[in-house]
Image (cartoon, helix red, strand yellow):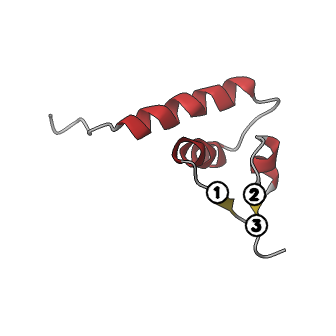
């Protein structure tokens, strides 16, 4: 490994592939950070807990909004 490279885990590769699928199948522009979060969450089987439910629901995620 060189100073300019980082180790890449299988989970990172899986999240990147999911992110690609999300962006290809999106019906409109996606907020970049939200789409990264969505891909990581899906790759690891987590749930999203947020107040900002709209972008994640647009992607087909079930979102937990504890503040509502």
Task: Name the residue carrying label 3.
Answer: 51
**Element type at mark 2:** strand
The mark tally for this picture is 3
- The N terminus: image quadrant: top left
Q: CA distance from mark 2 to mark 1?
A: 7 Å
Residue found 71% across the figure and 64% down from its top: 50
Is 21 located above or below residue 6 in the figure? above
Q: CA distance from mark 3 to mark 1?
A: 13 Å
Q: Is residue 29 left or right of residue 44?
A: right
Judging depth in this view, the residue of 40 and 52 nearest the camera is: 40
Residue 63: mark: 2
Which of the two discs, 2 and 1, labels the residue nearer the N terminus? 1
**Element type at mark 3:** loop
Judging depth in this view, the residue of 64 and 24 nearest the camera is: 64
Q: Looking at this view, name the residue that lies furthest to the top.
A: 24
Residue 61 position, x and y percent, is: 74, 47
Which of the two discs, 3 and 2, labels the residue nearer the N terminus? 3
Q: Are marks 2 and 1 in contact (CB under 8 Å)?
A: yes
Task: Name the residue carrying label 1.
Answer: 47
Q: Crowdedness of circle 3 by 10 Å Cα count: few (<14), some, many (20+)?
A: few
């Amino acid at each position: 490994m060189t100073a300019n490279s980082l180790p890449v885990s299988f989970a990172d590769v899986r999240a990147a592939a999911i992110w690609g699928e999300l962006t290809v199948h999106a019906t409109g522009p996606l907020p970049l950070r939200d789409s990264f979060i969505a891909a990581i969450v899906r790759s690891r089987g987590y749930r999203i807990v947020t107040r900002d439910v709209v972008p994640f629901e647009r992607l087909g995620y079930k979102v937990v909004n504890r503040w509502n």
